Image (spheres, coloured by chain):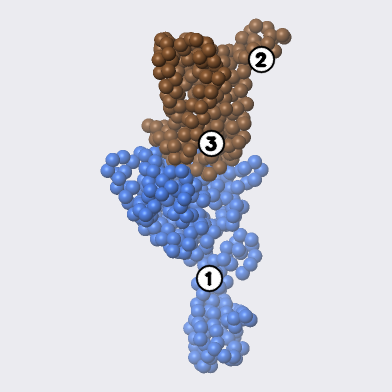
Amino acid sequence: MIVVNNLSRHFHRLKAVDELSFTIKPGEIVGFLGPNGAGKSTTMKMLTGFLEPTSGSIEINGQNMPGEAKALQEIIGYLPEGAPLYGDMTVFQFLCFIAGVRGLKGKRRKARLQNVIEQVELHDVLNRQIDKLSKGFRHRIGLAQAIIHDPDILILDEPTDGLDPNQKHEVRELIKKLSKEKIVIISTHILEEVSAVCNRALIIHEGKKLFDGTPYELQCRSRYHQAITLHFSYAADISGLAEIDGVEEMEIDRETGDITLFPEPGKLIMAPVTEHVSHFRLPVDKFTIETGRLDDVFREITIGKGA
Amino acid sequence: MHSLTIARREFGSFFATPIAYVYIAIFLVLSGVCTFFMGDFYARGQADLLPFFEFHPWLYLFLVPAIAMRSWAEEKKSGTIELLMTLPVSTTQTVIGKFLACWTILGLALLMTTPLWLTVNYLGSPDNGIIVAAYIGTWLMSGAFLAISQCLSAVSRSQVVAFVLSVVVCFIFVVSGSDIVIDAFKNWANNLVVDTVASFSFLTHFDAMAKGVLAASDVAYFVLVTASWLFASVIIIDENKAD
């Protein structure tokens, strides 16, 4: 359980984190969202005890963060932004070093090493120097070092940054697998990641919390939530579409010819639209129900316009 | 225990990169050059290693900052300091670990000068007790140089800045006991000031050690200098690790 109260961090005059408060319970996978420089990394650095807060408090399992940092750091796994690693070591040396510092010994050490190497799929590069590996591997090594002691709390700063789609998928699967009884906090500016992995989203902007809810709630905020996009195989009379009960607005994309029907808030328009289409025998060759465009919501929340 | 884990990693990384080899090679070459050409090892006609030890402060002056400059500057630059400081290891343990790793390498370089010792024993019959004492003395002194250099490496993320700062500070510690500085002070300051300045000098304290006298005050001086600079490192790192 993480309880953060009025957390602030100033760098000289800049307020990187400004009176942030939230509570995270075990089992939650929280996605920190926000534009670059929003204070996500700073918050994570304070949660892991790397930075001390200017004011406010962090309590993890009832213990104070900067106060009992060394005890708490034993149950936290952390992947710093950009996955910094000791490049002159081989992958195996590095993992052994981390296991050593984490106090893993004997059989457990061997078992944990085997486990993470398998989970993150590092067997092929174990004896390669870290400096000579690709970014994808470096991120995976960073992830391996963060989970080697099977931590209760996992804090990952942009874990999928710079990975190819396959690697991203693997990392997401890994995070999902890990997180049954744990707390996982990931920061990202890839919005799909939040709906793919997290069960809670926190949007931070200029150090302040702007949204706290499930990714679904975030989607619901989109104007496109439950909107219907149609395409006709040849020109047809579309004048009636805007008049359907529950449709608030109709938009036509002139380039693609796609027609989007926006519902009035809280209304579902699929049934009346399909009825209309079959009644007038409209030549529909594409019919999509939108789930909501997170990019728009994100822009709306952080800039206060868009969508 | 954690310090040893850190020390082992650091030690390994010195040998994974050519740094340790370069340091040892240059130290051996330069100490040889100094002993035989500048120290008149043969012409003195004495079976001792004084000409060898005499030059050590001047060798350390450049070589120790060179090997220590990356200690913290590199961690900061590559961001690994964030990894290191969020592991359950205290700053003090890390500082000690890094110091021990580097100090061991300085010790290794000294060990590799034993052929010189054998040579002296072959040429004459030196007092080996004196030589052992001088070896211990020079290793202690190198620790003081190292503590200063590692501390200043924590000041900046640039290794060049760390190197230059370290050389300057070490130089001040070395020359404060030299004739030039003492003379400059003698003209206007009273004896107390002159003695204080001189007592800060590595040269003053090392002089006796090089001759084989391990006085408690000299040993205590180097241990104290080392400990205070290591302590300063802990404070500096805790303060500016995120800069």
Q: Identify the residue under disc 1.
A: A292
- Badge 2 vs badge 3, beta-carbon distance below 8 Å: no
Q: CA distance from mark 1 to mark 2?
A: 77 Å
Q: Position of residue A283 (x, y in %)?
A: 53, 90
Horizontal side of A264 relative to B3 (left or right) equals right
**Measured from the top left, where is residue A300 in percent x and y?**
61, 64
Q: Is residue A14 visible?
A: yes
Image: A108 above or below B210: below
Q: Which residue has dot 3 on it?
A: B70
Foreground label between 1 and 2? 2
Task: Name the amino acid type tagged 3.
Answer: Arg
As measured in the structure, the alpha-carbon distance from the residue carrying label 3 to the one carrying label 1 is 50 Å
Badge 3: chain ID: B
Q: Quadrant of the C terminus of chain A?
A: bottom right
Can you tell which of label 3 and label 1 is closer to the viewer? 3
Which residue is denoted by mark 2 in the rendering?
B181
Crowding at dot 3, Cα within 10 Å, few <14 / some 14-19 / many 20+, comes out as: many
- Return the disc, 2 or 3, that comes first in the chain's sequence: 3
Measured Cα–Cα span from mark 2 to mark 3:
31 Å
Q: Is residue A251 above or below residue A80?
A: below
> In the rendered image, what is the letter of the chain coloured blue?
A
Q: State which chain is coloured brown.
A: B
Residue occupying image coordinates x 58% and y 67%: A296
Front one among B98 and A270: B98
Residue drawn at point x = 44 percent, y = 54 percent:
A137
Q: Are marks 3 and 1 on the same chain?
A: no
Q: Amino acid at mark 1?
A: Gly
Residue A197 makes an appearance in the image: no
- The residue that appears at 53% across and 23% down in the rendered structure is B33
Query: Which chain does the residue under circle 1 lie in?
Result: A
